[in-house]
Image (cartoon, helix red, strand yellow):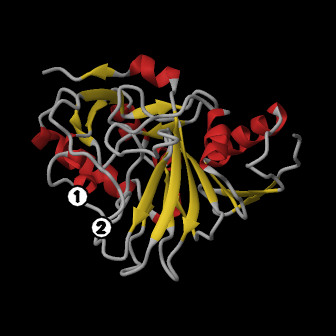
Amino acid sequence: MNQTLSIRRVAGALGAELSGVDLSQPLSDDTIAAIRQALVEHQVIFFRDQTLTPAQQVAFGARFGPLNIHPYVTGMASQPEVMEIIKEPSDKINFGGGWHSDMSFLETPAVGSILYALELPEYGGDTLFASQAAAYDALSDGLKRTLEGLSAVHSASREYAPGGASAQKRGAMQVAEADGLVGEFVHPMVLIHPETGRKALYVNPAFTLKIDGWKPSESKALLDYLFQHCRYEAFTCRFAWQKGSVAFWDNRSVWHFALNDYPGQRRRMRRVTVDPWPAMAATARVAAE
C-alpha cells in the first residue's frame, strides 16, 4: 500500500512526527524507504493514532531487519519478539529509566527500537531522547581525535546482575537475572552511521563498563564527562505519549530515558527491536580477559 507521509520536526537536534500512514497495513517498498529515510535523518520518529496487534507490530518492524528476542526479558508467548513493558501501580521502578541505548551489551547491537503505547497514566510517563550525533558534533576537535582511537567494553552484567535495576522484581514483567555468562563486547566509542556517514558517540551509562585497555578507575573520569555531556538539553527532545502512539528510534545514535513520574499508575507499552547493524558487527569483538 502506498501512503503519503507528512513530516514535522519536533526539536532542533532530533525528532520528527510522521502522519498520513497506517502502520497496521502492508506498506509499499517506497513508503518503507521514506520511513527509513526519516528515521536516519531525524534519528527518532513518532506516529500518532495507530492501532496495532502484536503480529502487525512484528510485521512492520520486520520490514527494517530481523527482530531481536531479548535475552533477559520474556516476550509474549504468541510473539516472542514482542516485549511488553509494563509498570504496575505497585511497582517502584520502571523499565528503561535512566539514560541508555538499547542492547549495546550484545556482540551485534540493535539498529532500532519500535515502542507502541497501549495504556498510559493520567499524567507523566513521557520519554526523553538525546542525539549522540549532536553530542559528538559539539566536542572539541582534540577530544574527537582522542575518542576516535578508543573503544569501550559493554556488558549486561551490571544492569541484569542480581540486584541490578533491570533485574528487580516487577508485577507484570518476567525479567531474568544475568547468570554471569553474559559476556563483554568491545565497540568503538565513535560510530560512523552506515546510511548517513554521520559520526556519533557510542557510550552507554547502563552497559558501558570501561574504556578498552584501561582500568575502570582510569576510565571513570572520561566516561563520567561523556555521560554528562551526552544528555545536554540542546541535544534532546521529549515525547508525550498518547494511546496509539509509536516511537521508532535509531539506537546507533540515540539515547532515551523513560521517565518514572507517575506513582501509583499503570503504564503498558509494547516493543520490538530491530537487528542487526552489519557494519557495527564487523567492528565488535569479545573483550580480553
- CA gap between label 1 and label 2 equals 8 Å
Residue 255 visible within the image: no
Say which of 289 and 225 sits in front.
289
Single out the residue that lies furthest toward the top.
282
Residue drawn at point x = 67 percent, y = 41 percent:
60
For label 2, the SS is loop
Circles 1, 2 touching at the beta carbon (< 8 Å) = yes
Q: Residue 133 in the image: state x and y as whole percent.
A: 52, 44
Q: Looking at the rendering, in which quadrant would you find the C terminus? A: top left
Question: In the displayed structure, does residue 179 sit left or right of residue 74?
Answer: left
Vertical position of residue 285 compared to residue 247: above or below? above
Say which of 2 and 237 sits in front.
2
For label 1, the SS is loop
Question: In the displayed structure, does residue 184 sit left or right of residue 273?
Answer: left
Task: Return the disc, 1 or 2, that comes first in the chain's sequence.
Answer: 2
Vertical position of residue 10 compared to residue 131: above or below? below
Residue 212 visible within the image: yes
Q: Residue 163 in the image: state x and y as whole percent.
A: 15, 55
Q: Amino acid at mark 2?
A: Ile
Q: Residue 59 in the image: state x and y as whole percent.
A: 66, 38
- Quadrant of the rendered structure where residue 64 is? top right
Say which of 13 and 110 sits in front.
110
Residue receiving disc 1: 168
Single out the residue that lies furthest toward the front.
78
Q: Residue 18 in the image: state x and y as whole percent.
A: 75, 56
Residue drawn at point x = 15 percent, y = 34 percent:
180
Residue receiving disc 2: 93
Give the label on residue 285, or none: none
Question: In the displayed structure, does residue 50 sit left or right of residue 265?
Answer: right
Residue drawn at point x = 50 percent, y = 77 percent:
121
